[in-house]
Amino acid sequence: MRGVDDPHQMTDLPTSLRERLAARFAASRPELVAHTVADEGHTHKVLLRYPDGEAIEVVLMLYPRRATVCISTQAGCAMGCPFCATGQAGFRRQLTAGEVVRQVVVVDAALRSGELGGTDLPAGAPDHVTNVVFMGMGEPLANLEATLATVRWLHDPDGFNLSARGITVSTVGLVPGIRRLAELGLPLTLAVSLHAADDRLRDHLVPINRSHPLAELEEAVRDYRETTNRRVTIEWCLIGEVNDSHEQADRLATIARRLRAHVNVIPMNPTPGVQWKEPSRGRTRAFMDRLEERGAAATLRDTRGRDADAACGQLLASYTLGGGSRLPVAVGAAERVETVASP
Ligand code: SAH
Ligand code: SF4
């Protein structure tokens, strides 16, 4: 029975199976503990708490004809990117496939029932989830099996029945995971968080680059595009005086052209404990102009919430700070980057 969230109501299944399913579902069923609304009803943030007490935020963004939910795959993240709030907090645990899937199910059900949006639904916004982006907490390809299972379920006609084009997986560049994702043979959107266009800077801004340097990443992305025939997105978090130089723009444009990728530039959201900031308007404009001059297709995203690619990412509820662990390559990344960043 489609759209039913409680196995007890799945009356087309045998009773014994219903009971077993109910037990499994209970273990991953989150409770909706808080809900905030921003941007005149366009952005909803929901705090979900799992039975073990772990909590994560899910963001729903409403547009005319599109309802995008931004989901998390891990509680925290071990990758330690020094500009990212989730990275600062470290890794706490993997989410199970059930827990990841639940984020979509819960938000979809709340949207359908009017609990989210309700009569204040922005004009033209759908009453159900149409797009899913893996851009919340965690690195999806570091929780590969759960991510693959979720993608399959999202796309499966007997699952959530979403078009593959409506699904975006954002990764910091875990090459083996990109290859596994390509093997699914689905035209998903792959978003690669590049942030630096040479290994020296990227080793520091995205510490996993030391394990999978740019040349290797570029090859995997090219193969992904060729296998899936899908245009890849490059994410670039623009950090003032760190990766906003003409030199980085030129190198980025070269990579984007080679990969025929679209670049999303997202001015950095300020994060507690991180002294970097978004660049001035002038430097941001100059960076965008330079990309255009060099023939890269690029869009500047709005950080103030309205934008799907900017409203999520680096999600952090206040109580999640501290206590997590990081990959050895990521330890000390924030301190070291000060010495390599050049205006
Ligand atoms: N771990 C994955 C997906 C989650 S992060 C990844 O890194 O791709 C989702 C997006 O938010 C990434 O592109 C990430 O670089 C970006 N992001 C992280 N911290 C940010 C910040 N302080 N300001 C703007 N974007 C940020
Ligand atoms: Fe993890 Fe992505 Fe944040 Fe890096 S940017 S620390 S990979 S969530």
Image (tube, grey):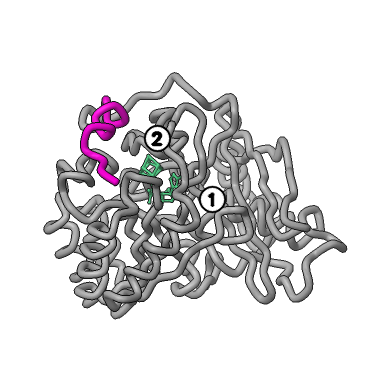
Q: Residue at x 57, y 47 (%)?
A: 21
Is the Cβ of the residue at disc 1 closer than 8 Å to that at disc 2?
no
Find disc 2 in the rendering and name its residue. Answer: 87
Q: Residue at x 31, y 76 (%)?
A: 293
Residue 83 spot, x, y in % from top left = 39, 39
Quarter-wise, where is residue 11 in the image? bottom right
Q: Is mark 1 within 8 Å of ligand 1?
A: yes
The front one of 284 and 187 is 284
133 lies left or right of 197: right
Which image quadrant: the N terminus? bottom right
Residue 108 spot, x, y in % from top left = 67, 59
Report whether residue 328 is seen: yes
Q: Is residue 275 above or below residue 100?
A: above
160 lies left or right of 255: right
Q: Is mark 2 within 8 Å of ligand 2?
A: yes
* Residue 72 painted magenta: no
Residue 43 spot, x, y in % from top left = 68, 55
Numbered badge on residue 312:
1
207 lies left or right of 74: left
6 lies left or right of 136: right
Q: Is residue 38 above or below residue 331?
A: below
Q: Earlier in the sequence, mark 1 or mark 2?
A: 2
Magenta part of the protein: which range?
332-343
Q: Determine whether the residue tagged by mark 2 lies in a helix, strand or loop.
A: helix
Mark 1 and mark 2: Cα distance apart in space: 14 Å
Residue extending farthest to the front is 282
Quarter-wise, where is residue 283 in the image? bottom left
Residue extending farthest to the left is 215
Q: Which quadrant of the frame does ligand 2 lie within? A: top left
What residue type is disc 2 on? Gly
Residue 30 spot, x, y in % from top left = 63, 39
